[in-house]
Image: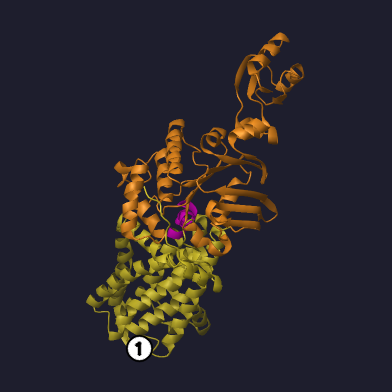
């Protein structure tokens, strides 16, 4: 197979500037057919700007970008015909009904009326919205609107689905339903590319991800690889009766591999969290509460950038 | 569920690269279809768009016509007031309808509904949006104009077979105004800016030789009036409906055509800058 067959998206030194501001600063990445690839980072890291370039709606300022081996600068429409896009904010057509949203969106791709009607039926099933087919969009719940947006993005049978912050603003139950739908898509062979600032979402969905900060990629790998490489196996979280948790950090030197000070707690990184907790107790340090948990991508991000993902 | 690749439009994109105009995939008609689908849910707007010029025709044409009796047109013909004013109302309503559609409606879709953001994620480009929205304004305007012409005919305000061309002319006037209106809309920051639209439309409606002949004005003002676009729309419709077709008609057509082309290209360019940054 040629490069364009297995590597669907390839970026080399990809850069985006707005006036004097550099939103994306020379990133390299490649997305392989069938995988779920994620951009993890806080707001303003350059994830959405990268996604807009990949979606061929934002011209590349510098570097190289290829989708299906094609250049967005010259083959934008041909590339977009093979993409599905789920934007950060729902842009459903509120003047149309649920099913009309799917029909009309399919027509934007030049599909025939017969084709869009057939597919809309399947997609309404997939989005669990068949009963709401003839309803207006406006009264739907946030989760339903998101599912409809995803259904709409699938009307052209895309090879790559781009999802920008797919579950931001949804309640936990709606998020789990959505994740389930995305898993099904992946199993049916659709390549997923998503941005998120939720580490649990990245861990749940992504085979591989890059961590972005200030427009650059600071780490790359599978969630497990990243945790293994940049964090300890476990974390001991300590909360003290103080306004300044940093005061307690000197007391904890040597308990674990590393201590991070957050405004509301201290994180002690150790392979054995319980042993670390015993050591804290042995030293006569008395926290208000202590909790041992597994390391997550949040810890990876904290270690790499010194900041939390969600502020 | 099956996943296949959607057809692509290679020729259209290659053409778009050769021409110095904003990109499009030749799918503008899909936006017309979208608007027609949405319109089915709000057909009441059709009634108001049609009613306005008809109300004017009866209040001014019949009401004032009873006081004025006859008017001597700029070409020297003496006609009754309804016959004089009907072509102008046709032109003015073509302008009003086109401007409303391409300013208020487009601004809402652009800034609030974010309709074009989702359209541009498909093979469609900014040129398709400009072509689609302007075409839609013309279709709607065409329906209003046709209905108005029927009413004007029944009211005895149509004098010549040339009036058959008054309908395409009205659509053409709509094109010029819809294109410029959409171009202007891409510069609007908030609803407050729409006061400028009213500021431009109202004096044109009143002073474009709409309700009295151009010869009524002092010479200097005549030049000002002749520089504005609605004057050319009114003059074009009046020439056709009164059967006074001469070379001068070409001048009006060229003026409106130039306005429309500048507006169309400008609107598509601005959409590209606004939405594809």
- Provide the secondary structure element on which disc 1 rests: loop
Residue B117 located left or right of residue A106: right
Residue A185 located left or right of residue B17: left
Secondary structure of the magenta portion, mostly?
helix
Q: Residues within 10 Å of mark 1 (few under 14, many from 20)?
A: some
The spot of residue B158 in percent (x, y) is 27, 81
Shade of chain A as shown in the rendered figure = orange
Q: Camera-side residue: A80 or B19?
A: A80
Residue visible at 49% across and 41% down in the picture = A166
Q: Camera-side residue: B202 or A118?
A: A118
Magenta stretch?
B105-119
Residue on which disc 1 sits? B244
The spot of residue A74 in percent (x, y) is 56, 65
* B117 falls in the magenta region: yes
Q: Camera-side residue: A53 or A133?
A: A53
- On screen, A238 above or below A48? above
The spot of residue B187 in percent (x, y) is 55, 61
Residue B103 located left or right of residue A136: right
Shade of chain B as shown in the rendered figure = yellow
The spot of residue B214 in percent (x, y) is 43, 82
* Residue A236 seen from this side: yes
- On screen, A162 above or below B16? above
* B10 falls in the magenta region: no
- On screen, B242 above or below A262? below
- On screen, B144 above or below A161? below
- Which quadrant is the C terminus of chain A positioned in? top right
- Protein image colouring: by chain
> Which residue is the extreme one toward the front?
A1
> Which residue is the extreme one toward the left?
B154
* Residue A97 seen from this side: no
Number of labelled discs?
1
Quadrant of res A301:
top right
């Amino acid at each position: 197979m040629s490069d364009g067959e297995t590597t669907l998206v390839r970026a080399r030194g990809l850069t985006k500037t707005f006036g004097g501001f550099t939103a994306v600063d020379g990133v390299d990445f490649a997305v392989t057919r069938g995988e779920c690839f994620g951009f993890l980072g806080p707001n303003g890291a350059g994830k959405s700007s990268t996604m807009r370039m990949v979606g061929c709606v934002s011209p590349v300022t510098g570097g190289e970008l290829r989708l299906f081996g094609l250049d967005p600068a010259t083959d934008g429409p041909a590339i977009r015909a093979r993409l599905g896009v789920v934007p950060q904010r729902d842009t459903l057509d509120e003047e149309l009904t649920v099913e009309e949203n799917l029909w009309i969106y399919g027509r934007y791709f030049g599909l025939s009326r017969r084709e869009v009607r057939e597919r809309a039926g399947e997609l309404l099933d997939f989005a669990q919205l068949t009963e709401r087919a003839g309803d207006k969009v406006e009264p739907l719940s946030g989760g339903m609107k998101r599912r409809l947006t995803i259904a709409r993005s699938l009307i052209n049978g895309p090879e790559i689905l781009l999802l920008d912050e797919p579950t931001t603003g949804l309640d936990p139950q709606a998020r789990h339903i959505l994740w389930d739908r995305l898993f099904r898509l992946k199993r049916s062979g659709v390549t997923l590319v998503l941005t998120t600032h939720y580490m649990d979402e990245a861990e749940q969905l992504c085979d591989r991800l890059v961590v972005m900060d200030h427009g650059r990629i600071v780490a790359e790998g599978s969630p497990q690889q990243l945790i293994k490489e940049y964090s300890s196996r476990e974390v001991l979280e300590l909360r003290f009766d103080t306004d300044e948790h940093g005061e307690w950090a000197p007391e904890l030197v040597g308990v674990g591999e590393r201590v991070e000070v957050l405004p509301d707690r201290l994180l002690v990184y150790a392979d054995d969290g319980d042993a670390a907790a015993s050591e804290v107790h042995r030293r006569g340090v008395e926290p208000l509460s202590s909790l041992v948990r597994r390391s997550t991508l949040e810890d990876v991000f904290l270690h790499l950038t010194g900041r939390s993902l969600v502020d | 569920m099956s996943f296949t690749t959607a057809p692509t439009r290679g020729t259209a994109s290659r053409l778009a690269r050769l021409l110095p105009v904003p990109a499009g995939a030749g799918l503008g008609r899909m936006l017309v279809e979208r608007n027609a689908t949405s319109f089915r849910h709000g057909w009441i707007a059709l009634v108001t768009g049609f009613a306005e010029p008809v109300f004017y025709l009866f209040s001014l044409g019949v009401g004032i016509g009873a006081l004025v009796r006859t008017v001597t047109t700029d070409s020297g013909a003496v006609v009754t007031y309804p016959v004089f004013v009907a072509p102008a109302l046709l032109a003015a309503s073509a302008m009003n309808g086109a401007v409303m559609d391409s300013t208020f409606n487009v601004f809402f879709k652009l800034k609030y509904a974010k309709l074009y953001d989702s359209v541009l994620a498909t093979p469609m480009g900014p040129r398709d949006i400009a072509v689609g929205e302007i075409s839609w304004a013309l279709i709607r305007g065409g329906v209003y104009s046709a209905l108005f012409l029927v009413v004007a005919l029944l009211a005895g305000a149509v004098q010549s077979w040339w009036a058959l061309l008054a309908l395409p002319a009205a659509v053409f006037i709509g094109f010029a105004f819809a294109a410029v209106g959409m171009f202007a809309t891409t510069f609007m920051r908030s609803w407050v800016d729409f006061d400028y639209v009213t500021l431009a439309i109202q004096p044109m409606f009143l002073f474009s030789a709409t309700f009295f002949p151009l010869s009524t004005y002092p010479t200097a003002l005549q030049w000002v009036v002749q520089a504005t676009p609605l004057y050319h729309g009114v003059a074009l419709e009046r020439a056709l409906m009164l059967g006074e077709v001469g070379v001068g008609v070409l001048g009006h057509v060229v003026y409106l055509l130039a306005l429309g082309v500048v507006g169309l290209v400008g609107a598509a360019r601005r959409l590209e800058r606004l939405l594809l940054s």
